[in-house]
């Protein structure tokens, strides 16, 4: 097929001056009419090294690296929760110092800082087991909530918090430390405050 294409091309284009000459110079060419089905010395296909889009080369193109999956958020447990102790006044404002005439409330707070839900199991439906207030001489008082019996699960979604507040209490002048013992051992939190 390539020989026939070459013959047609030469027949259609004008012959350059360098190729003009006696007709015996053209004796080696075979015209389209004279070509047989088989020409000696021209058996088989001619490999030009080219390929069409429908006939790709044998080599497979390099594969792209598979996309990486988004990492899963870390699984949090009760140990990842934040536990805090707070002293607030009757308006709910947190106080680091107060007057001996102020009614003080003591708060235990739990916050979930994780990106996944965390379940906190307590020994009863109360978040706090007790609030302990100790003065600088070592004397202490304890306030306990009134709770039913039976374990309780607190389901905390990301950013959720739960808290429990004690009854009010007035204290004399002095330096104190509040320790909140949560109803899920061993979690606790402490905070120092002053009464003037």
Image (cartoon, grey):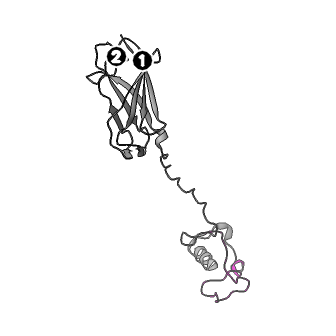
> Depth check: 14 or 43 in front?
43
Q: Is residue 159 magenta?
A: no
**Residue range corresponding to the magenta coloring:** 25-50
CB atoms of marks 2 and 1 within 8 Å: yes
Question: What secondary structure is found at the residue carrying circle 2?
Answer: loop
Q: Kindly state the secondary structure of the residue where label 1 is placed.
A: strand
Quarter of the rendering containing residue 97: top left
Residue 106: where, in percent of width, then height?
35, 26
Residue drawn at the location 25% of the way across and 23% of the way down:
91
Q: Tell me which corner region of the image, top left, top right, bottom left or bottom right, holds residue 64.
A: bottom right
Magenta span contains residue 36 = yes
Where's the N terminus, which quadrant?
A: bottom right
Task: Establish if 7 lies above or below 96.
Answer: below
In the picture, residue 168 is in which quadrant?
top left
Q: Nearer the viewer, residue 119 or 134?
A: 134
Q: Position of residue 31 (x, y in %)?
A: 63, 83
Q: Which mark is residue 112?
A: none
User: Pointer 1: what residue?
Assistant: 176
Quick check: 162 above or below 153?
A: above
Report the label total.
2
Identify the main secondary structure in magenta: loop
At horizontal 63% and vertical 77% (from top left) the residue drawn is: 2
Camera-nearest residue between 134 and 13: 134
| Residue that mark 2 sits on | 171
Residue found 32% across the figure and 36% down from its top: 146
Task: Give the Cα distance between marks 2 and 1.
Answer: 9 Å
Task: Give how far across and how far down residue 72 sits, in percent.
Answer: 48, 49
Relative horizontal placement of residue 170, taking residue 60 as reference (left or right): left
Q: Residue furthest left?
A: 91
Q: Within 10 Å of the Cα at label 2, are there few (<14), some (14-19), or many (20+) other Cα atoms? A: some
Q: Is residue 163 above or below residue 50?
A: above
- Is 103 rendered above or below residue 160? above
């Amino acid at each position: 097929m390539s020989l026939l294409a070459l013959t047609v091309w030469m027949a259609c284009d004008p012959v350059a001056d360098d190729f003009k000459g006696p007709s015996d110079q053209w004796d080696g060419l075979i015209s389209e009419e004279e070509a047989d089905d088989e020409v000696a010395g021209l058996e088989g296909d001619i490999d030009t090294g080219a390929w069409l889009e429908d006939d790709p080369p044998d080599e497979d193109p390099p594969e792209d690296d598979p996309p990486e999956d988004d990492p899963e958020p870390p699984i949090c447990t009760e140990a990842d929760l934040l536990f805090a102790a707070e002293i607030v006044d009757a308006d709910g404002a947190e106080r680091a110092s107060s007057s001996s005439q102020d009614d003080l409330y003591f708060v235990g707070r739990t916050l979930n800082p994780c990106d996944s839900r965390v379940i906190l199991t307590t020994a009863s439906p109360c978040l706090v087991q007790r609030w302990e207030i100790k003065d600088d001489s070592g004397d202490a008082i304890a306030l306990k909530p009134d709770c039913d019996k039976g374990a309780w699960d607190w389901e905390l979604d990301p950013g959720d918090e739960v808290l429990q507040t004690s009854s009010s209490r007035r204290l004399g002048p002095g330096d104190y430390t509040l320790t909140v013992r949560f109803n899920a051992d061993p979690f606790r939190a402490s905070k120092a405050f002053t009464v003037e």
